[in-house]
Image (cartoon, grey):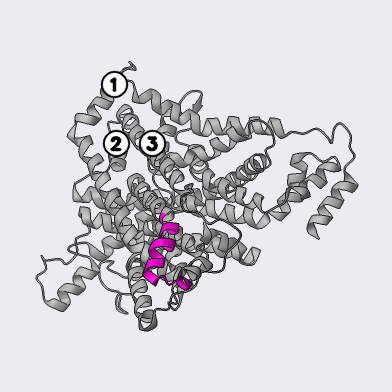
């Protein structure tokens, strides 16, 4: 009815004159293409320029020669590959069985397990790393204290040491395996049950059916998930900065960040960023090729729902195993943050005698940077979410409806930032906007550009999927009555996509609040955001203040999701979980 009313309104209000028939689609497409070039091409262009010149401005290959020969650069690169490869394999070993239990078995509370897994998406990896410091630091970690209390071990012994390469791999796995889980679970749920039934009717055993049908159909999703895990681990900055630097080693992202410490070396930072950029592009192309395989495809219409496998007496042990694994990214870290926030001594277990609200009073009334960081974070989150959602809406409309010759170029530019790691984009933006004619460094505008650029691909994908659910005949009816494309988008298509637009807004807002890798390159004392403030407090060792700010960040993102869920009756939150 809403669609009919919108079309009737167009019919009654629109007169087919030359003015109302003026279609601004092409000028808008040109405008958005130019904007995307500024967002993407300009910083990457300066990245290339600086990578191939020395401090005097002369063309040179010396920067790359140093990267390949200097152990201080070679070792971080090798360490990064070790971490990424280990994380990828570990995530596959953990996420694939859990995805099978959730998607294909009769394990109890399967939906609850899925929701808890997706909850780890909301937790910033750097905050999870800090929480695991509270839990597994060799001297003050709560788990090590409990172990010494139970076993009577001396104070110099520790069961866990999070400040190691193994500890870093473990923490990165905690916040990377959900990517593999979601891909594999969705693939398993799409396997038609009638294929497996047919195999069973022909005498195939359950294992042979899984080996010949289920696993081949889910294998591309698993391989793509492993690549995603490798990519996430390779480009991550927060967790390595929290755990690797105190342990005395670098990854490639922390090494790039260190090149901006005094004295800054932007040429080396640019040169070190290019291999990371190239590897990201290669991995994304490989993921796309795997997901686009047609070797194992279901031909025909929608098949029967997949049959759940009965676990018998193993149903409850399987649930216990899943919950035990979910303690690692969710329950234990959240408990450590709550303990530190409300305890007089963050490294001691919370009791009634140690309970205090002093940490909250201190953070919000005595830490001068808190109010500014909260204000900047909320302002940038709202601005980036609004601008990103509107840009994604218009670009997705122009590309999904093929409104002009350049729609493919526009779509390519909208997706291009997905291949640019946050730390690399931060370097490019720093190089691009610290000189005329666009001197934006030291302002919130440069952070806004970074946030919009980083989150645009995800927002664009969500809105493009939403447009595919709206039949083009509804828009053609408005066009028949003389409305332009943009008028149809405003009065017909836009109202139908309201829930998707709000979900996209929330998705971008939450992502902006937790973003650190680009912000840590671009911030100044007056443009500090919540994630950077937490990172700075980590260097001063104020764990109680970090816990308070971390919980505030989680509450802020949760409130945004709940508000969107209440506004749209649950549709927005569902889209956020699915994405």
Name which residue lies at 22% across and 59% down.
162
User: Disc 1 vs disc 3: Cβ atoms closer than 8 Å?
Assistant: no
Q: CA distance from mark 1 to mark 3?
A: 18 Å
487 or 316: which is nearer to us? 316
Q: CA distance from mark 2 to mark 1?
A: 23 Å
The furthest residue to the bottom: 313
On the image, the x and y values in percent for residue 256 come to: 31, 37
Task: Say if the magenta span includes residue 215.
Answer: yes
Residue at the disc numbered 3:
277
Q: Which mark is nearer the camera, 2 or 3?
A: 3
Under circle 2, the secondary element is loop
Q: Which mark is nearer the camera, 2 or 1?
A: 1
Residue at the disc numbered 2:
261
The residue carrying pointer 3 sits among few (fewer than 14), some (14 to 19) or many (20 or more) residues within 10 Å by Cα, namely some
Up-down relation of residue 118 to residue 232 (above or below): below
Of pointers 2 and 1, the one earlier in the residue sequence: 1
Residue at the disc numbered 1:
61
Of pointers 2 and 3, the one earlier in the residue sequence: 2
Under circle 1, the secondary element is loop
Q: CA distance from mark 2 to mark 3?
A: 22 Å
Q: Which residues are magenta?
A: 200-219
Asked if residue 365 can be seen in this view, the reply is no
Of pointers 1 and 3, the one earlier in the residue sequence: 1
Under circle 3, the secondary element is helix
On the image, the x and y values in percent for residue 231 come to: 37, 46
User: Disc 2 vs disc 3: Cβ atoms closer than 8 Å?
Assistant: no
């Amino acid at each position: 009815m809403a669609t009919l009313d919108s079309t009737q309104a167009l019919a009654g209000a629109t007169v087919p004159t030359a003015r109302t028939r003026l279609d601004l689609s092409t000028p808008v497409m040109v405008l958005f293409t130019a904007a995307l070039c500024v967002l993407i091409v300009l910083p990457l262009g300066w990245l290339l320029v600086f990578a191939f010149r020395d401090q005097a401005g002369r063309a040179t290959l010396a920067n790359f020669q140093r990267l390949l020969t200097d152990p201080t650069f070679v070792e971080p690169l090798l360490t990064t590959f070790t971490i990424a490869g280990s994380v990828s394999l570990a995530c596959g070993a953990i996420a694939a069985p859990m995805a099978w239990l959730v998607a294909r078995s009769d394990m109890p509370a399967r939906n609850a397990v899925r929701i808890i897994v997706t909850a780890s998406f909301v937790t910033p990896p750097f905050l999870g790393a800090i929480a695991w410091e509270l839990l597994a630091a060799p001297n003050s970690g709560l788990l090590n204290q409990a172990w010494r209390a139970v076993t009577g071990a001396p104070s110099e012994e520790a069961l866990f040491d999070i400040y190691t390469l193994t500890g870093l791999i473990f923490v990165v796995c905690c916040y990377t395996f959900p990517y593999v889980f979601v891909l594999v679970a969705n693939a398993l749920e799409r396997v038609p049950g009638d294929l497996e039934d047919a195999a069973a009717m022909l005498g195939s055993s359950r294992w042979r059916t899984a080996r010949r049908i289920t696993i081949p159909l889910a294998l591309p999703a698993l391989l793509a998930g492993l690549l995603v895990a490798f990519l996430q681990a390779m480009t991550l900055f927060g967790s390595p900065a929290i755990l690797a630097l105190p342990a005395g080693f670098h990854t490639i992202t922390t090494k790039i960040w260190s090149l901006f410490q005094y004295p800054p070396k932007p040429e080396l930072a640019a040169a070190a960023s290019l291999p990371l950029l190239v590897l990201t592009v290669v991995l994304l192309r490989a993921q796309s090729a795997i997901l686009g395989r047609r070797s194992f495809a279901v031909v025909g219409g929608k098949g029967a729902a997949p049959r759940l496998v009965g676990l018998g007496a193993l149903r409850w042990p399987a649930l216990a195993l899943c919950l035990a694994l979910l303690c690692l990214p969710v329950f234990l870290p959240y408990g450590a943050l709550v303990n530190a926030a409300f305890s007089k001594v963050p490294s001691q277990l919370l009791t009634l005698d140690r309970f205090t609200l002093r940490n909250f009073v201190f953070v919000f009334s005595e830490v001068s940077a808190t109010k500014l960081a909260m204000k900047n974070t909320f302002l940038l989150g709202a601005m980036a979410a609004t601008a990103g959602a509107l840009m994604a809406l218009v670009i997705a409309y122009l590309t999904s409806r093929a409104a002009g010759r350049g729609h493919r170029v526009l779509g390519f530019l909208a997706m291009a930032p997905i291949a640019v790691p946050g730390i690399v984009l931060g370097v490019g933006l720093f190089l691009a906007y610290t000189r005329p004619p666009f001197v934006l460094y030291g302002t919130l505008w440069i952070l806004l550009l970074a946030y919009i650029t980083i989150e645009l691909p995800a927002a664009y994908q969500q809105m493009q999927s939403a447009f595919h659910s709206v039949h083009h005949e509804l828009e053609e009816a408005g066009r028949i009555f003389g409305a332009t494309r943009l008028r149809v988008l405003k009065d017909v298509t836009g109202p139908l996509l309201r829930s998707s637009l709000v979900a996209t807004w929330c998705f971008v807002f939450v992502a902006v609040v937790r973003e650190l890798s680009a912000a840590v390159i671009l911030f100044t004392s007056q443009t500090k955001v919540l994630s950077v403030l937490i990172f700075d407090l980590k260097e001063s060792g104020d764990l109680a203040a970090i816990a308070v700010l971390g919980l505030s960040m989680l509450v802020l993102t949760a409130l945004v999701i709940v508000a969107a869920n209440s506004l749209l009756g649950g549709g927005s939150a569902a889209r956020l979980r699915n994405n």
